[in-house]
Image (tube, helix red, strand yellow):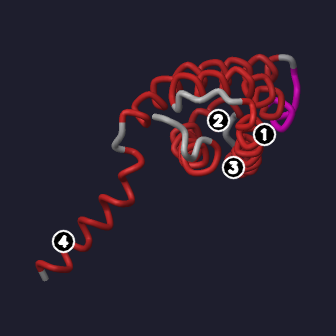
């Protein structure tokens, strides 16, 4: 039993290791700024009467360059231009998941602003995983 417990702890440590770093702490700090920017952009588009999909797409597009420079520069310390296309691809994945999840939450029916607020704590770690593993792999941290 002691050996299996050690294996379980080692497995848990390996699973959590990307989240127990200074890079992740910086990501969370920058994420607050980026999330505020994106949420305000989302609310602005909703206030103009646009459908949820348009609000997500517009807020996502507005935030991509802003977020590339904050995440790339402040979190992963790498703003190399060759990372922009993978960064955009990762964002498109997040936008797709976000849009689908919003549609599901609106079935309850939740207002889009509340639904987006509920989703944010789930989307942020997913965004970190995509950036850490695919976009900025090998970047100095």
Horizontally, residue 11 falls left or right of residue 45, namely left
Residue drawn at x 57%, y 46% is 137
Q: CA distance from mark 2 to mark 3?
A: 9 Å
Q: CA distance from mark 4 to mark 2?
A: 39 Å
Question: Which region shows up in magenta?
Answer: 49-55
- Magenta segment includes 50: yes
Residue holding disc 3: 101
| Residue 67: image location, x then y, percent | 66, 25
Residue drawn at x 58%, y 28% is 71
Label 2 element class: helix
**Which labelled disc corresponds to residue 85?**
1
Depth-wise, is mark 4 or mark 1 nearer the camera? 1
- In the picture, the quarter occupied by the N terminus is bottom left
Residue holding disc 4: 6
Task: Please tell me in which quadrant of the rendered image residue 50 appears.
Answer: top right
- Magenta segment includes 44: no
Residue 86 sits above or below residue 55 on the image: below
| Residue 11: image location, x then y, percent | 32, 67
Label 4 or label 2, whichever comes before in sequence order: 4
Task: Please tell me in which quadrant of the rendered image residue 35 appears.
Answer: top right
Label 4 or label 1, whichever comes before in sequence order: 4
Residue 75 sits above or below residue 132 on the image: above
Residue holding disc 2: 116
Depth-wise, is mark 3 or mark 4 nearer the camera? 4
67 or 85, which lies in front? 85
Label 1 element class: helix
| Residue 132: image location, x then y, percent | 54, 45
The residue lying furthest to the left in this view is 2
Label 1 or label 2, whichever comes before in sequence order: 1
Within 10 Å of disc 2 (Cα), the crowding (few <14, some 14-19, many 20+) is: many
Label 2 or label 3, whichever comes before in sequence order: 3
């Amino acid at each position: 039993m002691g050996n299996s417990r050690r294996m379980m702890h080692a497995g848990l440590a390996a699973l959590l290791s990307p989240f127990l770093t200074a890079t992740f702490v910086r990501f969370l700090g920058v994420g607050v700024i980026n999330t505020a920017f994106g949420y305000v952009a989302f609310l602005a588009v909703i206030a103009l009467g646009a459908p949820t999909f348009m609000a997500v797409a517009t807020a996502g597009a507005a935030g991509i360059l802003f977020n590339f420079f904050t995440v790339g520069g402040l979190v992963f310390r790498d703003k190399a231009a060759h990372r922009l296309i993978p960064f955009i691809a990762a964002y498109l994945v997040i936008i797709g998941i976000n849009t689908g999840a919003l549609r599901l939450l609106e079935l309850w029916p939740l207002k889009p602003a509340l639904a987006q607020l509920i989703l944010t704590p789930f989307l942020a770690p997913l965004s970190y995983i995509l950036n850490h593993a695919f976009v900025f792999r090998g970047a100095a941290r």
